[in-house]
Image (cartoon, rainbow, N blue to C red):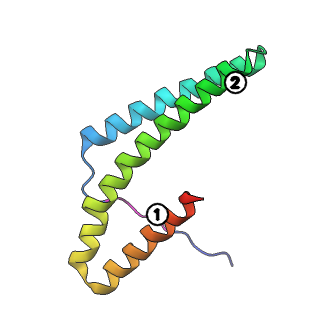
Amino acid sequence: MGKKSTVRLATDVCDQDRDRNLARLKRIEGQVRGIAQMVEHDRYCVDILTQIAAVQSALRSVGKELLRHHLKHCVADAAKLGKAEFEEASDELIELLYKNAR
C-alpha cells in the first residue's frame, strides 16, 4: 500500500496576511497568463523576460512573507513543544533554505 500523506497546517494564520498573500498570488497568476499570451503573439523577447523577472520578484515577495510567518509562528510553536519538535522544525527549515539556495 502507498504511504498515507497528512496535510499539515500553519499555526496562527492572520486572515489579513492570508488575504494579502492570496491577492498577490492571483495577480501573479494573471501576470503568468499575460506572459503566455506574449509568447503566443511572438512579442519581443526582452519584454517577455522583463515580465518573467517581475513574476519571479513577486513570488519571492510572497515567499518572504510565508517564511517570516513560519519562523514567527510555526518554528516558535515547535520550540514551545520541546527540544525534539524544535530540532525537527529547524532541520526542516535548513533543508528548505539549502534546497532553494541552488
Main secondary structure along the magenta-highlighted residues: loop
Left or right, 22 with reference to 56: left
Left or right, 69 with reference to 54: left
Where residue 53 sits, quadrant-wise, is top right
Graded by Cα atoms within 10 Å as few (under 14), some (14 to 19) or many (20 or more), the crowding at tag 2 reads: few
Identify the residue at image location x=67%, y=75%. 2
User: Identity of the amino acid at label 2?
Assistant: Ala
Graded by Cα atoms within 10 Å as few (under 14), some (14 to 19) or many (20 or more), the crowding at tag 1 reads: few
Element class at badge 2: helix
| Stretch in magenta | 6-10
What number is the disc on residue 7?
Answer: 1
Identify the residue at image location x=65%, y=23%. 35
> With respect to residue 21, does 79 lie above or below?
below
Q: Which residue is mark 2?
A: 36
Tell me residue 42's x, y (percent): 79, 15
User: Identity of the amino acid at label 1?
Assistant: Val
